[in-house]
Image (cartoon, helix red, strand yellow):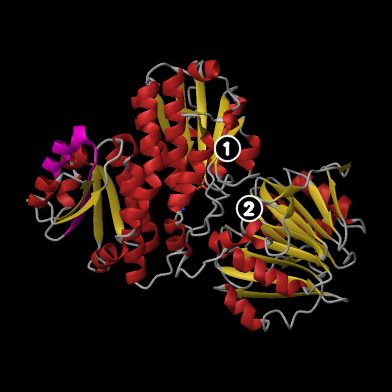
Amino acid sequence: MCGIVGYIGAAQAADIILEGLSRLEYRGYDSAGMAIFDGEKINISKSVGRLKVLEEMTHNGETMPGCVGIGHTRWATHGVPNTVNAHPHFNRSETITLVHNGIIENYIALKEMLKKKGYEFATDTDTEVVVQLLDYYYKGDPMEAITKVLQRVQGSYAFGIIFAEHPDRIYAVRKDSPLIVGRSKDGCFIASDVPAILKYTRKVFYVDNQEIAVLFKDDLRFYSIDAEEITKDEVFIEWDAKAAEKGGYEHFMLKEMYEQPKTVTDTFSPRIKDGKIVIDDLNMTDEELAAVKKIHIVACGSAYHAGVTGKYVIEDLARIPVEVDLASEFRYRNPILEEGAMVIVISQSGETADTLAALRESKEKGFRVLGIVNVVGSSIAREADSVMYTWAGPEIAVATTKAYSAQLVALYLLAMKMAYVKGKIDDVELDSMIEDLKCIPSQIELLLGNEKRIQRFANRYVGAKDIFFIGRGIDYSIALEGSLKLKEISYVHSEAYAAGELKHGTISLIEKGTLVTAIATQPQLYAKTVSNIVEVKSRGAFVLAVTTEGNDEIEKNADYVIYIPQTNPLFMNSLAIIPLQMFGYYVSVGKGYDADHPRNLAKSVTVE
Ligand code: AGP
C-alpha cells in the first residue's frame, strides 16, 4: 500500500526520494508526491498515475532543490486518486507537511472538531485531519504537538513530518503500519520498506508502535509516546542489493519465479542437519511440539492457500487436526482456541493488517503463535512467539511466487518434524522425505524450462472470459493458488473448485471452449479427478491437465497435458504450481498488462 521515503542530509533530497519511491512501486499506488524544504519554505509537487509523471514534472527532482524532504506513493482509501488527495499534505499556513500510510479511523470526529475551530479542508482524505491537528496543537515545540496528536488519533499510521520552523529534522512515527529508519554517513532516511534505502545504507532501525524517531542530518534519536528518549538497536541488513533489481528480466514476477529453486533450498537446507529436521527458530522442545493437539493456520491470499496445503500435509503426516482460516474472518468470529492449540500465522510481508490482528487476538487469548514470515523485523515477526523465516529475500512483484514456494517448504518441514517427534513417521520415512525435498529445486528448474511451451499455450487464452481450476485434496489447494495467480494479474475471471463439488452448481457455467485446468497429481484421487475431466469435456470444455509423469492415459481425456516429475505426493504443490504461475504471467503479458503492477492491488495490505 502507500509508500513513504524521507531524507535529511548532505545530498539533494528529491533525488533520493524519487529513487526510493521507485523501489516501493511494487507496493501499489495511484498517485505520488514529495515535499522539499528549499532553505526558506516547503515546496510540494504531486501527480496522479505513475511515478514517472512526478519525475517529469520536477525534471527528475531538479526543480525541487533542498536537502530535507519527504515523499509518498498513495494507494487511495479515503478520497479518489487525484492530485489534491495525493500526499504530502499541508497545514493551513503551509508550514507543516506530512505523509501518511494507514487509516485514521476517527477522522470524521476530528474533522468536525477542527471545523468548529475554523479549520477548512482541501482534501477528502483522512490524512489531512492529522496535519491540521498538528497545526492546532503546535505552539513552537514539534514534539509536544506530535505527542498530543498521537493521543487523539485512532487507527493505523506511519507518518513522516516536516516543520518549516525546524527544518533541521524530520519526525517519523508509526502504529500498525510499517516504517523503518536508516542511517548512513551522508544522512538519515525513513522508508516503508528496506529496498527503498538499500542503495544508501544497510544500517536500519525498526520503529516500534508509537515510537517517535527524530532524524537530523548527522544524528538520530528515538522517543516514546511520552517524549522520553529511548535507545534502539541498529540492525544490519544482509540482503543482496541485486535481489531488489530486475536483473535483465522483463518483470520482477518472472525473475522471482526463476529464483524459486534457490528460495526452496535456502528455506530447507539450514534446517536439515545430520539427516534430521532442526527448526531452531521454533524455540520449542520436541516434547512441547509433540504436545500440540490442534493447529489453527491463519493467513490471507496466497499465504492462506499455502496454509490449505499445510493442513493436508500436517494432518496426513502428523495426524494433528488443522483448521485453516482467512485472517479477515478469523479475527471477527470469536474463534474457539482449545487447550493445547497452536496458532500459525503465515505472511510474506509480515505486515498484513488482518493477519497481524489475528495474531494479536490469539495472543490475547493466551495461545502460542508461530509466524511463518519472509520479512525480517516486520510486525508479525516481532510480535509472534516464535518465527520461522522463509528465506526468499525481497519479493517485489505484487503476485507472490517465490515467497509462496518458501511458505510451502516451511510447512512441509514443520509437518515432518511434528510427525517425527510424535512417532508418526520413522527414520526411514523421514530420510525418504528429506531426499524428495532435496530434489525439488532441480525439479522446479526442469519445469521452468517449459516456459516457451506455456507461453504459447497462454497466448491462446488471452481472450478468455472465464477459466476454471479444479482438483481434489492437495490438488484443490494448488487450484486455489493457480486461479488467484491468473486473475490477479491478467484480470480474467477465474474460479477454483474442489473437483467433486462441480456437479453441485458450477458445472452449469461450462460451455463449449471454456478452459478448465484440472490438477491430478494425487495418486489416490487421480481416477476421481479424471471422471470430473470427462464430465466437463462432455459439456464442451477444453481441458488442460496437470498430472505426474507416467499418467499418459490422461491424454485420452484431456486436450493438453503438462507433466510434473514424481515426488512425494504431499510435496506436489511445489512442482505443479510452477506451470500455473507461468500461465498466469503469460496471459497477463499477452494482454499487454504490467504483471508487476496489477490494477487496484497492493503488495502489502496494511489496512483491513
Ligand atoms: C498473492 O499473489 C497476493 N499478492 C496476496 O494474495 C498476498 O498473498 C496476501 O495479500 C497476503 O500477503 P502477505 O503474505 O504479505 O501477508
Q: Measured from the top left, where is residue 139 in percent x and y?
A: 91, 57
Q: Nearer the viewer, residue 539 or 582?
A: 582
Residue shown at 11%/41% (left/top)?
531
Q: Which residue is mark 2?
A: 102
519 drawn magenta:
yes
Question: Magenta includes 454?
Answer: no
Distance, label 1 to label 2, CA atoms, is 14 Å
Front residue of 341/256: it is: 256
Q: What is the secondary structure assignment of the residue under circle 1?
A: helix
> Callout 1: few (<14), some (14-19), or many (20+) C-alpha neighbours within 10 Å?
many
Q: Earlier in the sequence, mark 1 or mark 2?
A: 2
Residue labelled with disc 1: 357
When the figure is inspected, residue 134 is found, relative to residue 339, above or below; the finding is: below
Under circle 2, the secondary element is strand
Q: Is residue 447 left or right of residue 422?
A: left
At horizontal 88% and vertical 76% (from top left) the residue drawn is 40
Q: Position of residue 498 (x, y in %)?
A: 25, 40
The answer to whether residue 115 of the structure is visible from this angle is no
Q: Amino acid at mark 1?
A: Ala
